[in-house]
Image: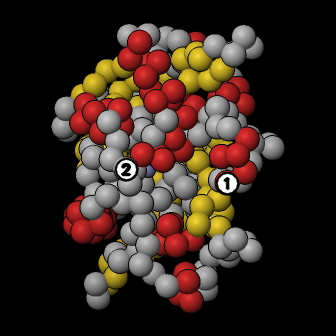
């Protein structure tokens, strides 16, 4: 996909599983299980998709997946599957070296979105993954993550983001942020305080990285809101507003956690948003 002067690619950094009750919130299993299969422990298959943008001057990634720092126990709990993909391999397949990345936009700091921002090197030293990049995070999200509430604490691991502050690579931004002529960072607070969705547009084509606002195609349904969301009714309002724009302006929605569906265009009829077209970035 090309938008403005950006060439855009995407790849999967890992697969993982999460309890279906968490993923689909108040939707009963009798309904969601018609579309999505679960394993014997009620877990459903998810993935982490990374978006990569290159305009010849800037090489940008949006989110970094779980990375490889999780303990053996957590890797088992989340069934992390890196057997044929990871963040660095995905970039390597695009002929991009970590040193070439100029900007990392972190939609939020939950470990499945920010874990790949750092890694343990061969000497077991915690190291920033992209040494020449500026990492963009909303200031309120950073404050939220370093002093997490008890309900959200299990989703934040300081080793994912505190090294970015120490190395001087962290850029804390406040509110709506026009990154350049084509990229706009929009904070929303239903899922977690000041998570960002990323709107990439040249006036003809618009791609929205929906982060955890619409993590899978099933979340197009308005009541389908993850049980993780801090403020589900705010998520509902945010979904209505952004999905309405996506319908009227024919946006492409990028779904970062859906292993089956990478991108969709949406339509609306009788109070229901639905997929009108499935697309691929590449
Ligand atoms: Zn999240």
Taking the spot 43% from the left edge, 19% from the top edge, the residue there is 164
Farthest-out residue, front: 150
Q: Is residue 178 above or below residue 189?
A: above
The residue tagged 1 is 77
* Contact? badges 2 and 1 (CB < 8 Å): no
Q: Position of residue 145 (x, y in %)?
A: 36, 37
> Relative to 114, is 137 on the left or the right?
left
**Residue 213 lies in quadrant:** bottom left
The residue under the point 26% across, 50% down is 188
Which residue occupies the extreme left position in the image? 175
Residue, far right: 83
Residue 60: x %, y % from top left? 47, 27
Assign a secondary structure to mark 1: helix
Q: Going 56% across and 89% down the picture, which residue do you hit?
A: 30
Mark 2, residues whose alpha carbon is within 10 Å: few (<14), some, or many (≥20)?
few
- Specify the quadrant of the image occupied by residue 168: top left
**Residue drawn at 41 percent across, 78 percent down:** 26
Instruction: Give the left or right position of residue 191, taking residue 32 as reference.
Output: left
Disc 2 under 8 Å from ligand 1? The reply is: no
Q: Quadrant of residue 166?
A: top left
Q: Nearer the viewer, residue 172 or 201?
A: 172
Q: CA distance from mark 2 to mark 1?
A: 19 Å
Specify whether 91 is left or right of 278: right
Q: Is residue 265 visible?
A: no
Residue 9 shows which numbered tag? none
Label 2 sits on a secondary structure element that is: loop
Q: Position of residue 42 (x, y in %)?
A: 65, 73
Marked residue nearer the N-terminal end (2 or 1): 1
Give above or below for 107 relative to 17: above
Position above or below: 31 against 230: below
Question: On residue 150, which mark appears?
Answer: 2
- Location of residue 33 in the rendering, given as x and y in whole percent from the top left corner: 61, 82
């Amino acid at each position: 996909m090309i938008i403005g002067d950006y060439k855009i690619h995407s790849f999967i950094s890992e697969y993982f599983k999460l309890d279906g009750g968490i993923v689909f919130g108040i939707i009963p299993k009798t309904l969601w299980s018609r579309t999505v299969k679960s394993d014997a422990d009620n877990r459903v298959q998810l993935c982490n998709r990374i978006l990569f943008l290159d305009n010849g001057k800037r090489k940008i990634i949006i989110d970094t997946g779980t990375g490889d720092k999780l303990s053996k126990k957590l890797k088992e709990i989340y069934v992390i599957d890196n057997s044929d993909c990871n963040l660095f391999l995905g970039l390597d397949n695009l002929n991009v070296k970590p040193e070439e990345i100029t900007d990392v936009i972190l939609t939020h700091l939950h470990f499945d979105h920010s874990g790949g921002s750092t890694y343990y090197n061969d000497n077991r030293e915690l190291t920033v993954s992209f040494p020449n990049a500026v990492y963009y995070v909303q200031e309120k999200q950073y404050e939220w993550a370093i002093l997490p509430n008890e309900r959200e604490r299990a989703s934040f691991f300081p080793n994912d983001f505190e090294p970015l502050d120490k190395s001087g690579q962290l850029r804390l931004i406040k509110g709506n942020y026009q990154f350049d002529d084509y990229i706009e960072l929009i904070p929303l607070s239903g899922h977690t305080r000041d998570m960002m969705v990323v709107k990439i547009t040249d006036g003809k084509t618009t791609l929205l990285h929906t982060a955890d606002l619409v993590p899978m195609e099933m979340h197009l349904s308005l009541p389908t809101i993850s049980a993780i969301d801090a403020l589900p009714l705010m998520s509902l309002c945010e979904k209505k507003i952004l999905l309405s724009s996506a319908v009227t302006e024919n946006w492409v929605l990028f779904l970062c956690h859906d292993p089956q569906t990478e991108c969709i265009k949406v339509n609306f009829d009788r109070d229901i948003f639905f997929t009108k077209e499935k697309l691929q970035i590449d």
